[in-house]
Image: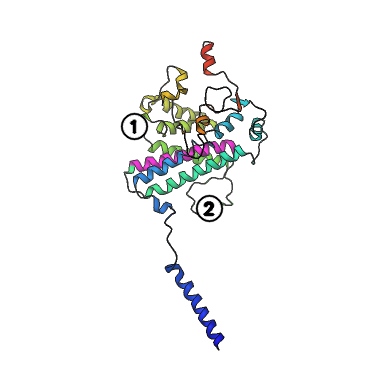
Amino acid sequence: MKKNTLFRILVLTTLLVTSFSCTKLDEKAVSILTPEQYFKTEADAEASVMGIYSLLANADSYGRRLVMVLQLLGDDCDIGDIGTQSSRIQLNSFRHDSSNQDVLAVWRTAYLGIGAANAAIDGIPAVTMNDTKKAALIAEARLLRALYYYHLVQLFGDIPYIGEYVSDPSKVTNISKTSAEKVYENIIADCEFAIKNLPDTYSGAVKARPTKGSAHTLLASVYMILKRWPEAAEQAEIVIKNASTYQYGLVQDYQNLWKADLGYQSEHIWVVDFAGKMTGENNANVDYTAPMTGVRDADMLGWSDLQQECITVSLMKTIGKK
């Protein structure tokens, strides 16, 4: 009898703990910022878009690896040191696969950027702010997403396309590929939205944020890749005819395009700002973020594993710009 009574007490105690644990003992997360908690003010909306840019300038994107992958797979440069990392030699000789560390870095960083863009696109509509400014921020995030996919689809062809914010990672664990054709359609849609909602310019002639001209230019490039020549020409013509509106123009001296001390130039349509002294990267961007990353014997800090395969501007000047 005592055993049965004790058993009932234990069962009752367990039921009580189970029944009330959810409401009495569960603590609210105070150190984790969720999208639902974050998007409250216009400043929050701005910050969410600025966060997307952080993945463009780091060493696994325009900071170095993306540029290096694109150049090694093209004819802009060659391996200058046969003892360099095997991943670079593989790219240079077209023997790379999905295990290549440079390729993996580009892939991962692009999808991190896409995830940040999707979070901004999903969260900004809930913020109370000027409708025109809100649409412009969403357009900026969508064009950044388009840029990431622009590189991914060219490098890999059919790829997973994630077009919305993912709150549960398990939902994309086994995501299937999307055809390159469909990916390009989505890129075009993002560009068209950006064209409608981005400003013509930013105050201070800022070129690190996209404008209507940037969106027209990216769209023209997409149409060229797809060999849709009339549409590519149409987009390019819009940029040319509206050059003064977008504050574009040819520089008098071509070398000035690459002089960092001169800042933004009229030929710059959309730039990735230099990001030196980034915490945790040991000043890597002092060397890595450059017009042409890692050119052997270039006049820059750091070291180099690549060898240029083109006449440099300084040589062009020496031989009379022939």
Q: Nearer the viewer, residue 74 or 17?
A: 17
Give the farthest residue toward the top: 320
Q: Quadrant of the N terminus?
A: bottom right
Q: Residue at 43% x, 62% y: name it.
A: 27
Q: Amino acid at mark 1?
A: Ser
Q: Residue at 49% x, 75% y: name it.
A: 15
Query: Closer to the N terminus: mark 1 or mark 2?
Result: 2
Residue under label 1: 203
In x, y percent, where is residue 308?
59, 23
Q: Main secondary structure of the magenta part?
A: helix
| Quarter of the rendering containing residue 81 | top right
Magenta segment includes 172: no
Residue under label 2: 169
SS category of the residue bearing label 1:
helix
Q: Quadrant of the C terminus?
A: top right
The magenta stretch spans which residues? 132-157
Q: Could you tell me if residue 75 is visible in this image?
A: no
Q: In the image, is 187 to the left or to the right of 136?
A: right
Q: Amino acid at mark 2?
A: Pro
Q: Residues within 10 Å of mark 2 (few under 14, many from 20)?
A: few
SS category of the residue bearing label 2:
helix
